[in-house]
Amino acid sequence: MGYIVQLKNGVYAFKEWTSTHGVDMIAANLMYRPSYISLHSALAHYGMIPEFVAHTTSVTTLKTATFNNELGTFAYRHLKAEFFWGYRFIDSASQRKILMASPEKALLDLLYLTPGLKSEDDMLQLRLDEDYMASEFDLDQVRLYLDRFNSKALNKRFNTLQKVYFND
């Protein structure tokens, strides 16, 4: 008894698997497809924000949903199908691949899905790691991604963020 855990209706896992390091990210990919980990969860994974993220957030072309199980809380935000790109496979401790947004796409997904982020103060509240932004964040990649989004509002939000973190 108790060998199987329900992750959501119709999705189950062996109890022993649930104690594997990083299993929450693998479960996030498996529970609601198509999806990839993004937003604050990806930003935290890359070390771009200092906060611990209590739940795993992904984007999906399906409707917005949230699932709670013994692994934690899994939130899925709807993203238009034409914006469902910019993710990569990353390795997990269990040798399974995890779909996660690139650092640049995770930040743009956040700005796109959070239209309330408008002011310089709003951007400061993101608490992005300035060293990461200066040395590892790829502004050329962001510009390519912004062209694909083709959104004036997103361009404006990113320009505001750029003023705060890149002194442009």
Image (cartoon, rainbow, N blue to C red):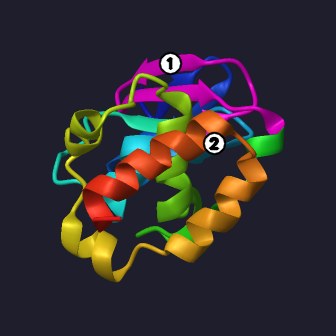
Query: Which residue is located at x 72 percent, y 37 percent?
Result: 33
Query: How far across and down, in percent of the image, does residue 153 sit?
Result: 59, 34
Relative to residue 121, is residue 131 depicted above or below? below
- Report helix, strand or loop for mark 1: strand
How packed is label 1: few (under 14 Cα within 10 Å), some, or many (20 or more)? few
Q: How many marks?
A: 2
Query: Which residue is located at x 41 percent, y 22 percent?
Result: 116
Which of these two is toward me, 46 or 29?
46
Magenta stretch, residue numbers: 58-81
Q: Residue 1: within the magenta?
A: no
How packed is label 2: few (under 14 Cα within 10 Å), some, or many (20 or more)? some
Residue 109 visible at all: no
Give the amino acid at mark 1: Thr
Write down the residue under mark 2.
Answer: 30
Query: How far across and down, in percent of the image, does residue 161 sit?
Result: 37, 50
Give the amino acid at mark 2: Leu
Query: Which residue is located at x 39 percent, y 46 percent?
Result: 160
Write down the residue under mark 1.
Answer: 66
Which of these two is toward me, 52 or 7?
52
Query: How far across and down, in percent of the image, does residue 164 sit?
Result: 27, 54
The numbered dot on residue 139 is none
Relative to residue 26, is residue 5 depicted above or below? above
Residue 120, located in which quarter of the rendered image?
top left
- Closer to the observer: label 2 or label 1? 1
Q: Residue 74: within the magenta?
A: yes
Counting residues from the start of the chain, the first of labels 2 and 1 encountered is 2
